[in-house]
Amino acid sequence: MTSNTTSDLQAQFEALKAQNLNLDMTRGKPAPEQLDLAADMLTLVDGDSYRDEFGTDCRNYGVVDGLPAAKTFFGAFLEAPADQVFVGGNASLTLMHNVIMRAMLFGVPASPRPWCKEDVVRFLCPVPGYDRHFNICREMGMEMIPVPMNDDGPDMDRVAQLVADDATIKGIWCVPKYSNPTGAVYSDAVVDRLASMKTAAPDFRIMWDNAYAHHPLYSETDPLKNILEACEQAGNPDRVYHFGSTSKISFAGSGVSALATSPTNFADLMSHVKMETIGHDKINQLRHLRFFKDMDGLKRHMQKHADILRPKFEKVVEILARDLADTPGVSWTTPRGGYFITLETAPGLAKRVVALADELGVKLTPAGATHPNGHDPDNRVIRLAPSMPSLAAIEQATAVTALCVKLAMAERD
Ligand SMILES: Cc1ncc(COP(=O)(O)O)c(C=O)c1O
């Protein structure tokens, strides 16, 4: 790159600095107008309508695994039999955290001993991935092994080779549909290999965090093979815990979470859950059942979300293509659903890009957040979250990001 170009870029940088921007592309939260879509839910249960169809008083204790209708609803949501579904509180992250914590304390069915009694517990972490999964592993003292994430799921040759020989590898994190942060959807072949691969650990578990299962950006959605069935068919019925929630469907702070798993895992889970609660929030379950009615209702609702989100995602991709096309070593994903876009800079530049953007008043997710222990060895992945800002803010923030990519490259050269 010529010095002229560098000085041009620097001049643009200084001009933008003078604008004192204050933009934020870090938050994978629904925008207020998305939350407004479910506003009517708040009035669907009142002082006269707190019973379910069996007459259960939802204000009271009890029904620890969820209202029968909620189990049926989330059975359809997770594509699992209702009697294998546990309906929890507002956060699927809590369900995931607790599954891992109980595995550490007690083990899971087929564990030779509690995981905390092992000398070392390792977990596979497809990268780039979701920082809160990595935080759970770090909190529990697990060793995280990054494996590359491809367009159709994790690099399965690498995964299969690692788990076949190493009994300390107890599991893998997966966000199988519109993944955080690349938007990838796992192929049938990847699902089948995960379900059937030979694992040295008898108690290997797949943490199937299907957070974006029902979050398409387009009317035509993308299929995902049913992993619970695939595990059953492969003779490994207890291998998977499948998680989901309505956090980005109804209200991010007041949704309903659910988990589906094998009958053996389910019985084990309930034996512990009964110690920790006398029942989750059934009033909220009732609100959700009355609002969505069934999966057709939920899918119709999610098309309204898509109508809000799609222009935002398309704007990011449009600006990146306009400003960074043919920039060597730079690429980005074009998700068909979910909440994130991944931008890859040339190697070694992501942190500098984030710092430059920060100087211009544009907050980006810290570089490295997409990798275990906050360390992206190539220092090139940046997660963009277009859901929350307005379209105008997204346009400006993406243009600033693109300028910072070019400036970081110019500085390097
Ligand atoms: C992959 C993934 N899993 C889980 C969550 C959190 O889900 P919940 O609100 O149900 O805890 C998020 C939120 O960003 C996410 O991206």
Image (cartoon, helix red, strand yellow):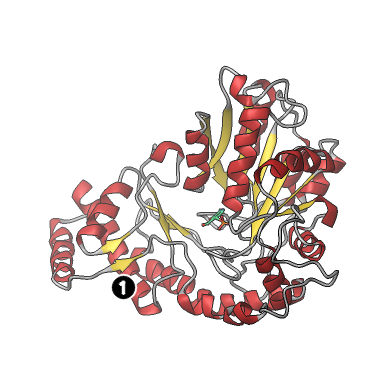
Q: Residue at x 30, y 47 (%)?
A: 351
**Element type at mark 1:** helix
Q: Is residue 249 above or below residue 187?
A: below
Residue marked by disc 1: 396
State the image coordinates of residue 103 (x, y, percent, origin top left).
Answer: 65, 32
State the image coordinates of residue 137 (x, y, percent, origin top left).
Answer: 52, 36
Residue 11: quarter of image = bottom left
For residue 162, say whether it is visible.
Answer: no
Q: Give the number of marks.
A: 1
Seen from the viewer's position, the closer of residues 413 and 184 is 184
Going by the picture, which residue comes out furthest to the top?
A: 119
Please rate how many residues cluster around mark 1, counting C-alpha atoms within 10 Å: few if below 14, some from 14 to 19, many from 20. some
Q: Residue at x 39, y 37 (%)?
A: 377
Q: Is residue 308 above or below residue 411?
A: below
Left or right of 275 on screen, residue 226: right
Give ligand 1's quarter of the image. bottom right
State the image coordinates of residue 309 (x, y, percent, origin top left).
Answer: 51, 74
Residue 322: quarter of image = bottom left
Q: Is mark 1 within 8 Å of ligand 1?
A: no
Seen from the viewer's position, the closer of residues 331 and 46 is 46
For residue 41, say whether it is visible.
Answer: yes
Q: Residue at x 64, y 52 (%)?
A: 176
Q: Amino acid at mark 1?
A: Gln
Residue 51: quarter of image = bottom right
Q: Residue at x 67, y 77 (%)?
A: 45
